[in-house]
Amino acid sequence: MNLRATIYLLTFLVASTSSEAAQRQLTVFSDGTLAEIEAVASKGIAEVVLPTPIRENSLRVKPLDNASIEQVVLLPFKMPANIQRELDQLTEQKQRLEDRLKALDTREDIFEAAAKSQSSKAPRKTKTNPDPLASVRQGTDFAIAQLEAVFTARRRADQELKRISNRIAQLTKVAVGGPTARVTVSPANGRVRIAAVLDSSGWQPRYELRLDGSGTARLTQVAMADLPPSGFASRVTPTALSDGMPQRTTPLLPGKTTPLTTWQLPVSQQSFSAGPLTHFSITLQNTTSHALSAGEATIYYLGEFLGTVMLASTAADAPLTVSNLAP
């Protein structure tokens, strides 16, 4: 393959990957997440499985490329057949183990009573029982041996029950999904864009506060959000859902913090202790035009990390004190 052909191939692969990512997009707002998925119909039907349950009355379907929508049906989430089959088997095993544990409780009560009865007997020598102490010991040993067997069986049943319960929890977590949007369109290969607000919270705020002794501090708001489902590109916006489609977004990168907004705020007071134990108290003025939500703040002074504290929610044009000193 010559150089020109190689370049064409790489360009095609990059374009295809970008197009596919753009077809499945999550936009994480401060109070929710919007999912947008493009789909091409097959024989006049486009079906899209949403990644999680959605908020009521949030489903929207838009025709693309001169297609027209004839019908939209929202089907409830259906558990995948292989997962449902395994869940049914595990549930049956769990119920059997629970029944076994109940039976073992009964056996324990019986043999505990038998052991107590044997140990409390007054030994009496008779023709048919010339060594009563040996008989009592034998009866007691038998009851105790049965109790040991019950304890061993219960321990094994408890371990197996724990394993099965953990597996059920894993499958249930993995199997959580959203409904299926089934769209009838024309022409038979028409394209649509399906959008819905997921039934989940938006990003959570975190802050980085950096001071350099200049009388101002740089406060950066960082978005903390769950990793997107497989196959989705994800971005965050500082706005709320009620503000409409965002004018500015930032890609959400797996395993990395996502800075949203940075402000330079005036510092009215600051104090730092010298020594192995670091203490600090800083008072800022929120000169931004909106309130700051509460969140964890990481503090840096002259580039040195000093620790983390909780930043309280602060109204616009109000003072904000950041301190690790006891109140």
Image: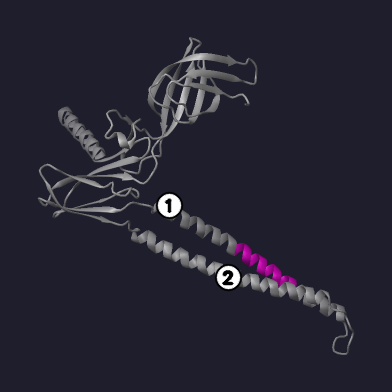
Q: Which residues are magenta?
A: 142-156
Circle 1: is it few (<14), some (14-19), or many (20+) Cα within 10 Å?
few
Disc number for residue 100:
2
**Above or below, 271 relative to 170:** above
Residue at x 60% of width, y 63% of height: 156
Residue at x 46% of width, y 21% of height: 318
Which residue appears farthest toward the right when viewing the image? 125
Q: Nearer the viewer, mark 1 or mark 2?
A: 1
Residue at x 79% of width, y 76% of height: 117
Q: Tell me, what colour scheme is on the image?
A: one colour
Disc number for residue 10:
none
* Front-most of residues 6 and 118: 118
Of the residues shown, which amino acid type is indicated by label 1? Lys
Q: Position of residue 218 (x, y in %)?
A: 44, 18
Residue at x 51% of width, y 13% of height: 268
Q: Quadrant of the N terminus?
A: top left
Of the residues shown, which amino acid type is indicated by label 2? Arg
**Above or below, 275 relative to 155:** above
**Above or below, 153 relative to 274:** below
Per the image, the residue denoted by label 1 is 173
Q: Secondary structure at mark 2?
A: helix
Residue 103 placement, left or right of 293: right
Residue 136 placement, left or right of 172: right
Q: Is residue 211 visible?
A: yes
**Above or below, 231 relative to 292:** below
* Location of residue 159 by image quarter: bottom right
- Decide: marks 1, 2 in contact (CB < 8 A)? no
* Front-most of residues 129 and 88: 88
Magenta stretch prevailing secondary structure: helix
